[in-house]
Image: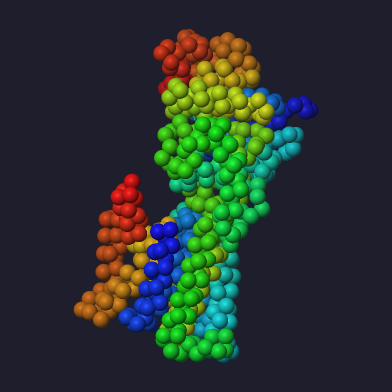
Amino acid sequence: MYNKKLNLVLLGLALVAPFVLYPVFLMKVLCFALFACAFNLLLGFAGLLSFGHAVFLGTGAYVTGYVMTTYGLTPELGILAGVAMSALVGLVYGKLAVRREGIYFAMVTLALAQLAFFFYLQTPFTGGEDGLQGIPRGNLFGLIDLTDNMTMYYFVLAVFIGGFLTIYRTIHSPFGQVMKAIRENEPRAISLGYKVNQYKLMAFVISATLAGLAGSTKALVFQLASLTDVHWFMSGEVVLMTLLGGMGTIWGPVLGAASIISMQNLLASGPLANYIHVVMGVVFVICVLAFRKGLVGELQKVLRKNSG
Amino acid sequence: MNQDLILETRGLVKEFKGFTAVDDVNLKVERGTIHALIGPNGAGKTTVFNLLTKFLTPTRGQLLFNGQDITRKDSASIAHMGIVRSFQISAVFPHLTVLENVRVALQQKRKDTFAFWRSEKILDELNDRALALLDSVGLREFSHALAVDLPYGRKRSLEIATTLALDPELLLLDEPTQGMGHEDISVVADLIKEVGKNRTILMVEHNLNVVADLSDTITVLQRGAILTEGNYETVSADPRVREAYMGVEEDPLEGEGGEGNAPVVEASV
Ligand SMILES: Nc1ncnc2c1ncn2[C@@H]1O[C@H](COP(=O)(O)OP(=O)(O)OP(=O)(O)O)[C@@H](O)[C@H]1O
Ligand SMILES: [Mg+2]
C-alpha cells in the first residue's frame, strides 16, 4: 500500500521533473541509476562484486553508437544491438568469472575489463581517444524525432522504468529466491542441490544486459561513446553509487547515482573542479564509516525502529 | 554385495598437504538405520561428511550410494540423488524468512528455478507443504521471522526442516545438537528418531546420551581411521574407545549426566 503510493509519487515527480531541472542532467541521472541498479542486482542480491562493470556500459554505448552512425538504424534497433552485444560479452565474461569466489571473482572481472579497455582503445571503429562523436538519436520507431531533449527525456524515462521493473521482477521471482539463497549461504544452497554457478551466471548476464541498456541509452543522450565509459574509473564509480545509496535495496542505487551525479555537476563548475576525485574519495570514506548500509539502508533502519 | 547397504566407502583417504585427515575408511551404512559417527575432536568426522558430499575431493578411494559409484559426481548432483547434509555450524539462510528457508529447498525440485520473469507469488503453492514441515519441528509460529533472529536451537530445527524438505533417502547430520540447551536437545533427538523411521541417517554426534538413545550402529573414528564399530554395548565396552576419548579409565560412555547435563565429550584436550 505504502509502497504503491510512494511509487506513484515518484512517477509523478519524474514526469514533471524536466520542467524544473535540466533534461540532460536528469537523463544522465536516469542512465547511471539504471547502471547502478543493474550492478546492484549482482552485488546486493547475488553477492557478487564485479570490478569491471564498465565493460558492459561501454560495450552498449560503442555498439549502439557504431550501428546508429554507420547504418542509420532507428534508435530502438540501435539500442537492441548494443544490449545484445553486452549480453554476449556478459555471457563470456560471466562464464570465466563465476568459477572464482570472493576476491578472485572481483579480480577476474577487473582483469577482463582491462582487456576490453585495451581492445576498445586499439580497435579502429571506436575512434580511439576521441571516441564516437555526433551519434544521431534518430527517429523512434521511425516516427518520433528524439532530437528534442524533452522528447528524449520521456524516452529515457521509459527505458529506465522498463529496466527497473525487470530488475524488480528478477529480485522477486523464483530465480530471485535462489539467487538470494546463494548470497546468504552458498554451501547450504549447494547442499540443497543447486548448481550455484549456473545461477550466478544467469544473474551476471542479466546484470550485464541491463548495464548495456544503460550504456546504449547514454550514448544516444550525449550522442557520444568514449573511453570514459569503459575505463576502470567507471567500474569504481558504480560501486561507489551503489554503496552510497545502499546495496541490496531497491532504491539505493537510484539515490546513490542521483547524489553522485549531482555532486559531480556542482563541483565541476566550482573551485573544486580539479579535485573531484578527491572529494569523491572523501565521500566514499565517510559513507563507509558513517552509514554502512548506505542512505536507503540507514533510512529503512530508522523507519523500522519507529514503526516497531 | 550387500543389497542393504545404502552407502559404502572403500579405502577412503583424504590428505591435506601430507597430513592424513581420513585414513583408509571403509564405512558401511545399512538402509533404514540410524548410524552414528563419533570420535574425539579432529578425528576427521566432518571431513568424512565433506568427502561424502564432495565438498572435498577424496585423495583416494571410492564412494558408493545404493551400489552406484558417486566418487566423481559434484555436490549438487549428490543432493539430487538423495543425500542431503547439514553442517556443523548452523546453516540457515539468515536474511530469508523461516518460511522462505524451507521453500528454497522445496523449490529445488521445480522446473522454474531460473524463471526470473515470473512473480515469486507462484511459490505460494509451496506454502502448505512448507508450513507442514515447520509444524513438524515446532516452528510454524515463527514462519515470518527472519532466520537470523531465531535462537540457536531453533535454527538447528529449521535446518532439519529444510533438509527434510528435499525428502532425502540419506540424511547426513553433523552434530545436530551441538551448542544446544537440554530441552532443545531432547526436542531434536525426538525429531531425529521420528525422521529416522522411514529413512537412513548418518550423524556425527558428541552427546553420547543422544548417540546411545538413537543409533543402531556406531562407528568410532580416531585420527582419521576407524577404531571400532558396532552397537552401543559393544562400542562402549571397548577399552580403546575410552582411551581415545579421555585417555583415562573413567567411563565416558556411561550415559548418566547429573542435573540434566548430558555427558558431552568435547574439548577433551
Ligand atoms: N580444509 C582443510 N585443510 C587442512 N586441514 C584440514 C582441513 N579440514 C580439516 N582439516 C584437518 O583435518 C582434521 C580433521 O578435521 P575434522 O573437522 O574432520 O574433525 P572432526 O572430527 O569433525 O572434529 P570436531 O569434532 O572438532 O568437529 C583436523 O586436524 C583438521 O585440522
Ligand atoms: Mg566436525
The quadrant of the image that shows the N terminus of chain A is: bottom left
Which residue in the rendered view is the most extreme toward the left? A271
Give left or right: position of B95 versus B170.
Answer: left
Q: Residue at x 52, y 57 (%)?
A: A172
Residue in the foreground of this view, choosing between B194 and B230: B194
Asked whether A81 or B52 is in front, the reply is: A81
Task: Decide if residue A253 is in sight here.
Answer: no
Coordinates of residue B73 in the picture (x, y in percent)? 67, 44
State the image coordinates of residue B229 (x, y, percent, origin top left): 63, 19
Query: Of residues B113 and B13, which is closer to you in this image?
Result: B113
Q: Quadrant of residue A206?
A: bottom right
Quadrant of the rendered structure where residue B197 is? top right
Colour scheme of the rendered structure:
rainbow
Q: Is residue B1 above or below residue A304?
A: above
At horizontal 57% and vertical 89% (from top left) the residue drawn is A142
The percent position of residue B121, horizontal first and vertical second, equals 56, 54
Direction from residue A150 to residue A20 in the image, left or right: left
Residue ID at (56%, 81%): A76
Rendering quarter of residue A8: bottom left
The residue lying toward the viewer, choosing from A296 and B209, is A296
Count of numbered circles in the view:
0
